[in-house]
Image: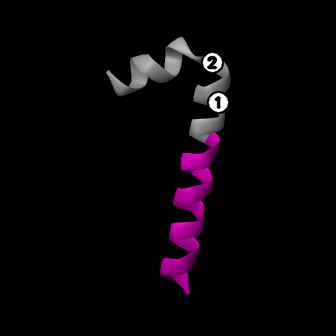
Amino acid sequence: AYVQTIMSMPGIGMITSLAIKANSISHSLWVVR
């Protein structure tokens, strides 16, 4: 359901996916430190 909601809204889905990627990258950087 969550993925379908994002797919139905391309612009918001793109921003959301970028935010999730940035969040995971920053989290991994904190773990490395």
Residue 19: x percent and y percent? 61, 47
Q: Nearer the viewer, residue 33 or 22?
A: 22
Q: Amino acid at mark 2?
A: Pro
In the rendered image, the quadrant that contains the C terminus is bottom right
Give the residue displayed 62% in from the left and 55% down from the top: 22
Residue 12: x percent and y percent? 62, 27
Which residues fall within the magenta stretch? 18-33
Name the main secondary structure of what is drawn in magenta.
helix
Q: Quadrant of residue 29?
A: bottom right
In the rendered image, the quadrant that contains the N terminus is top left
Tell whether label 1 touches label 2 (CB within 8 Å). yes
Placement of 32 over or under 6, stated as above or below: below
Q: Nearer the viewer, residue 25 or 1?
A: 1
Residue 7: x percent and y percent? 51, 17
Numbered badge on residue 32:
none
Which residue is the site of mark 2?
A: 10
Placement of 23 over or under 32, stated as above or below: above
Mark 1 is surrounded, within 10 Å at the Cα level, by few (under 14), some (14 to 19) or many (20 or more) other residues, namely few
Give the residue displayed 52% in from the left and 12% down from the top: 8
Q: Secondary structure at mark 2?
A: helix
Mark 2 is surrounded, within 10 Å at the Cα level, by few (under 14), some (14 to 19) or many (20 or more) other residues, namely few
Measure how far apart labels 2 and 1 are at the Cα level: 6 Å
Extreme-left residue of the structure: 1
Which residue is the site of mark 1?
A: 14
Q: Nearer the viewer, residue 5 or 21?
A: 5
Q: Amino acid at mark 1?
A: Met
Look at the image and say whether residue 25 sits in the magenta stretch: yes
Placement of 9 over or under 12, stated as above or below: above
Q: How many marks?
A: 2
Give the residue displayed 56% in from the left and 58% down from the top: 23
